[in-house]
Amino acid sequence: MPPNSRGNILYILLLAIILFASLSYAVTQSLRGGGADASSERSDTLAAQILQAASLLENSMIRSTLIGNIRPHQFDLSGINSLASQNSACLSSSCRMLTGNHQGTVALPTVPSWATYNGGTIDFRFLMIKTLDVGTDASDLTLALLNISRPLCLSINKALGIDSSLIDSQIDAYAWSPSYEMATYTGTLTDMPSGFGTLGDVFTAARGQRSYCLANQGTYSFFHTLIAR
């Protein structure tokens, strides 16, 4: 083999090694970036599902109030992914809202473990809480999803156009406790339950918002006003 041919082969081999190394680096960086994008994308997708379900539930309750003459304390909010128990004050399909409860049509999304704060299982609650500048001074019937992950919380606020830049410095004192059962909308009701707590006074970006996520007591929680009073 002529000397110049050997040189050409060595050059081609060296070039192939360089190209392979460059390709490997590019693929590795792409996978890393793709993983981050995928994680953000799944949080954005779940946030959209949560907000869609919350809006649909609110609109369905308004329709039932106006057309079905359902009073605010008569809604049965038990069903799939809900912690509420059946309300015997509900006497027709017009006040059964959620799937898994007779003719309920609103589906609350399942929250996977990656979207929770501690990797556990969480369901939706219905609480009586006051959000400042929403309705009157009375507590509002509020859909709540407590102990969600920070990425999901940020995705929710991003979808709503809410500034989260101060979310980790304006930490709300509200935290769930068994002593707050009086503020829970669940079971058989003869009137609206008593309220507990005010939101929007610490995390000011939530003030006047019907839907938002905030940091509270070392975790993150989503709230959506269903019936403002």
Image: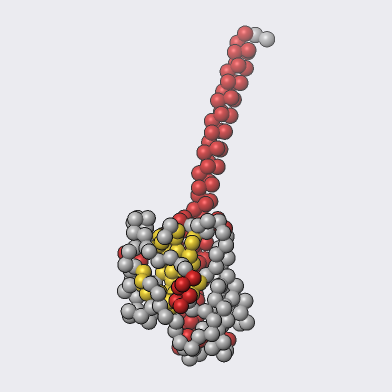
Could one spot residue 97 in this view of the protein?
no
**Residue 215 appears at what percent x and percent y?**
40, 60
**Residue 139 appears at what percent x and percent y?**
38, 78
106 shown above or below 72: above
> Looking at the rendering, in which quadrant would you find the C terminus?
bottom left
> Looking at the rendering, in which quadrant would you find the N terminus?
top right
Residue at image position (52%, 52%) is: 39
Using residue 37 as the reference point, say whether residue 3 is left or right of it. Answer: right
Using residue 136 as the reference point, say whether residue 40 is left or right of it. Answer: right
Residue at image position (46%, 67%) is: 176
Looking at this rendering, what residue extends furthest in the front direction? 179
Using residue 25 as the reference point, say whether residue 183 is left or right of it. Answer: left
Quarter of image, res 132:
bottom left
Residue at image position (48%, 91%) is: 69
Residue nearest the viewer, comparing 36 with 71? 71
**Residue 196 appears at what percent x and percent y?**
40, 74
Residue nearest the viewer, comparing 154 with 191? 191
